[in-house]
Amino acid sequence: DKYRIAVVVGSLRKDSINRKLALALAALGPQDFSFEHVAIGDLPLYNQDDDSNQHANVKRLKSEVANAQGVLFVTAEYNRSVPGVLKNAIDHASRPYGQSAWAGKPAGVIGMSGGAIGTALAQQHLRNMLAYLDMPTMGQPEAFVQNKEGLFDDKGHIANPDTRKFLQTWIDRYVAWVKMHAKM
Ligand code: FNR
């Protein structure tokens, strides 16, 4: 059976470099893994009053995560933290209390921005949340991908050989991490 990975991109931007990175990472993954992007842009703003009557799109997000063997977060950094849209999605799928979709799902955290330490603080804040949500999260290798001219080729694959090698190692380790922690 295939391992399904729910890919959560922490950016809604049409030309998001993090979405590009997520697609390029998926292309480096093995045959027995399928990477499925989950939509977070169509969720309402989280309101605890709705916990007993979750929006259809929230239920959809929760079932996509529940049906996955792992979660891959590929996030932008906004003002040295995670974008609000990502926090909103995390909060939604963590509720109602005791019915979190995240619990126990092995996670990987990666991100890309223009800065040399780009997304490091966003990733650290995200790790804090994932620890609380009881998601076994791969600690190493870390990856703070800097957006440089020529990083992607015209097919969206990683063009730079050193970066490709590094990201291949990253995805190989993530695959092993999921296999170690997934409940099939
Ligand atoms: C940013 N950006 C940014 N970059 C960074 O490295 N650290 C930061 O704290 C921030 N803060 C920030 C706030 C806001 C509101 C915006 C709109 C942007 C720049 C950001 O990395 C850049 O826009 C990326 O292209 C965002 O990723 P996506 O949307 O291309 O995936």
Image: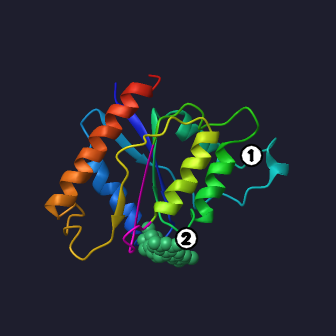
Q: Name the residue located 58 percent from the left edge and 58 percent from the top edge.
A: 86
Residue farthest along the bottom direction in this orientation: 149
Q: Is residue 167 magenta?
A: no
Left or right of residue 25: residue 101: right
| Residue 14 in view, yes or no | no
Q: Which mark is residue 126?
A: none
Work out whether residue 167 or residue 121 is closer to the camera in this orientation and state it: 121
Q: Secondary structure at mark 1?
A: loop
Q: Name the residue located 37 percent from the left edge and 28 percent from the top edge.
A: 179
Q: Is residue 24 above or below residue 130?
A: below
Quarter assignment of residue 53 = top right
Position in image of residue 69 (x %, y %): 45, 32
**Which portion, as a residue range, is magenta?**
108-118
Position in image of residue 137 (x %, y %): 48, 39
Left or right of residue 105: residue 47: right
Q: Is residue 69 above or below residue 49?
A: above
Whole-number angstrom distance, CA of label 1 to CA of label 2: 27 Å
Q: Is the shortest distance between ligand 1 and the CB of mark 2 under 8 Å?
A: yes
Of discs 1 and 2, which sits in the foreground?
2
Q: Circle 2 sits on which residue?
A: 78
Left or right of residue 150: residue 142: right
Q: Residues within 10 Å of mark 2 (few under 14, many from 20)?
A: some
Q: Secondary structure at mark 2?
A: loop
Work out whether residue 125 or residue 47 is closer to the camera in this orientation and state it: 125
Locate the N terminus and report the quarter of the image it occupies.
Answer: top left
Q: Circle 1 sits on which residue?
A: 54
